[in-house]
Amino acid sequence: MKLFSLSSLLFATVVLRPVFCKGKVPVLTNCLLQLAGHSAYDVTEDGNEYSVFTNGYERGRIAVTRVIIKKPKTLEIKTAYNGKDTTNSKLHLNQILMALWTEKGGLRASSLKRVKFLEVANDSVKAAIQAARQELELEDVDDFELDVEDADEDLLSNFRNSVFGKVVARLCEASGHTPESISIEHTAGWDDITWDLA
């Protein structure tokens, strides 16, 4: 599949529809994005938190991606099951994230300076974190930070080649930034991973 630039293919469309939540009054929400003329993705908004739904993941019953936009510079990803999305001509995670940032957050791509994945469950990212802790002689619950300019190239390569590392690389292409540091924070049995961009 050929990937195209977000600026040429991604644009927003607003459609209002009622959403009925158990025990709540119906509210109006916005529907998301079209990519090359197909609009298979819906977004619900709750303050600064956005949930993206598509019939290609769990028949649209569970959000394929959940994101928090923390203005002016941080994007936090709560869940991302895009690898299991079977939507035809699906949007990739980086495309969804950048569309939410610019269209829903109303922010310029270049203002994105921090990308944080909460409660990492992805195997490739977990393996990169574990390898880094072993190399740095840290315990399984220790926090750490890698400065991209100074860190061991093999450790950085593990993060770059992980699923989330590739997403961050594409976000950097769209925003005109490069990764500056990677930090891991262990909280309540989970690791959060943050890429700071320069």
Image (cartoon, rainbow, N blue to C red):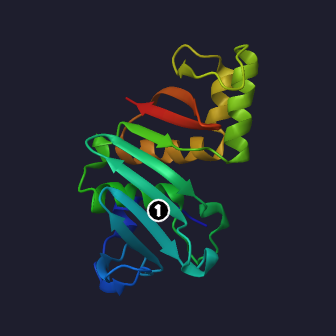
Task: Look at the image and tell me in which quarter the C terminus lies.
Answer: top left
Relative height, residue 107 to residue 72 (above, below): below
Amino acid at dot 1: Phe
Camera-side residue: 21 or 114? 21
Whether residue 35 can be seen here: no
Percent of width and height locating residue 2: 56, 64
Percent of width and height locating residue 185: 55, 29
Residue drawn at (29%, 80%) of the image: 27
Question: Could you say whether the residue bearing mark 1 is in a helix, strand or loop?
Answer: loop
| Left or right: residue 187 compared with residue 110 | right
Relative height, residue 121 to residue 198 (above, below): below
| Left or right: residue 100 compared with residue 107 | right
Q: Quadrant of residue 24?
A: bottom left
Q: Quadrant of residue 157?
A: top right
Count of picture labels = 1
Camera-side residue: 128 or 167? 128
Residue drawn at (59%, 77%) of the image: 87
Relative height, residue 160 to residue 174 (above, below): above
Crowding around mark 1 (Cα neighbors within 10 Å: few <14, some 14 to 19, many 20+) is: few
Residue drawn at (66%, 41%) of the image: 162
Q: Say which residue label 1 marks.
A: 4
Percent of width and height locating residue 75: 39, 46
Relative height, residue 57 to residue 80 (above, below): below
Percent of width and height locating residue 135: 74, 17
Task: Look at the image and tell me in which quarter the N terminus lies.
Answer: bottom right
| Left or right: residue 47 compared with residue 52 | left
Residue drawn at (28%, 78%) of the image: 14
Residue lying at the far front in this picture: please name it: 23
Whether residue 116 can be seen here: yes
